[in-house]
């Protein structure tokens, strides 16, 4: 059994990590945490849908836009750029006429997509219950 100090500190307690380790790991609850940008990119409405769509297959921009109903060109371009900068999406320019670009997931992106797919599946499985609660609340 753990001692009292261990029992009080949870599995996410960073107090025992060096400052360098804490900075590498991040602390999502901290306003200055660099992980928050990645979290925002991955869990935005369009980020989730891009990750899920690309987990199915490599796609061109226009294919992604058609697959993700309601996304504007501007928002799709921004989302892809952020996910690419985070190392989740790979952008590949093909030297053909006319030139075009394909997007796919990196290894890290495939792992991230699995995580957000789990959340999306949970939402889909519970949407009826959620809508009933909303209706009851008058929203």
Image (cartoon, rainbow, N blue to C red):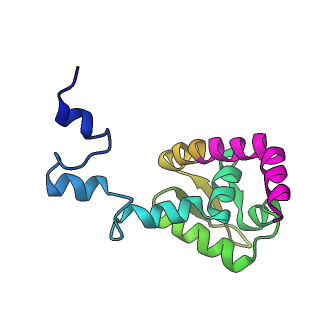
Q: Residue extending furthest top? A: 1
Is 120 situated left or right of 13 in this image?
Answer: right
The N terminus sits in image quarter:
top left
Provide residue 131's location: percent of width, then percent of height. Answer: 82, 53
Q: Is residue 131 magenta?
A: yes
Tell me: residue 10, above or below residue 60.
above
Work out whether residue 104 or residue 118 is closer to the camera in this orientation and state it.
118
- Outermost residue to the bottom: 74
Is 78 left, or right, of 131 in this rendering? left
* Residue depicted at 32% across the width and 38% down the height: 11
Quarter of the image where one finds residue 66? bottom right
- Counting from the top left corner in percent of width and height, residue 115 is at 56, 43
Q: Residue at x 49, y 60 (%)?
A: 39
Labels in figure, total:
0
Locate residue 93: give its quadrant: bottom right
Q: Is residue 55 left or right of residue 42?
A: right
Q: Which range is magenta? A: 116-139
The image shows residue 56, relative to residue 101, as above or below, that is above
Residue 23 rendering spot, x and y as whole percentages: 24, 59
Q: Main secondary structure of the magenta part?
A: helix
Q: Residue furthest front?
A: 137
- Residue 112 is covered by the magenta coloring: no
Identified at 74% across, 73% down, the residue is 98
Q: Position of residue 27 (x, y in %)?
A: 33, 57
- Image quadrant holding the C terminus, namely bottom right
């Amino acid at each position: 059994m753990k001692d009292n100090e261990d029992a009080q500190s949870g599995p996410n307690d960073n107090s025992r990590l060096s400052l360098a380790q804490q900075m590498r790991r991040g602390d999502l609850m901290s306003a200055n945490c660099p992980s928050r940008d990645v979290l925002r990119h991955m869990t935005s409405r369009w980020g989730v849908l891009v990750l899920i769509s690309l987990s199915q297959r490599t796609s061109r921009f226009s294919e992604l836009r058609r697959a993700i109903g309601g996304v504007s060109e501007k928002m799709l371009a921004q989302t892809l750029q952020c996910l690419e900068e985070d190392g989740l999406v790979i952008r590949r320019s093909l030297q053909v006429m006319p030139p075009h670009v394909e997007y796919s997931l990196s290894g890290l992106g495939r792992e991230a997509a699995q995580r957000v797919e789990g959340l999306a599946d949970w939402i889909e499985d519970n949407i009826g219950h959620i809508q009933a609660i909303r209706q009851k609340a008058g929203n």
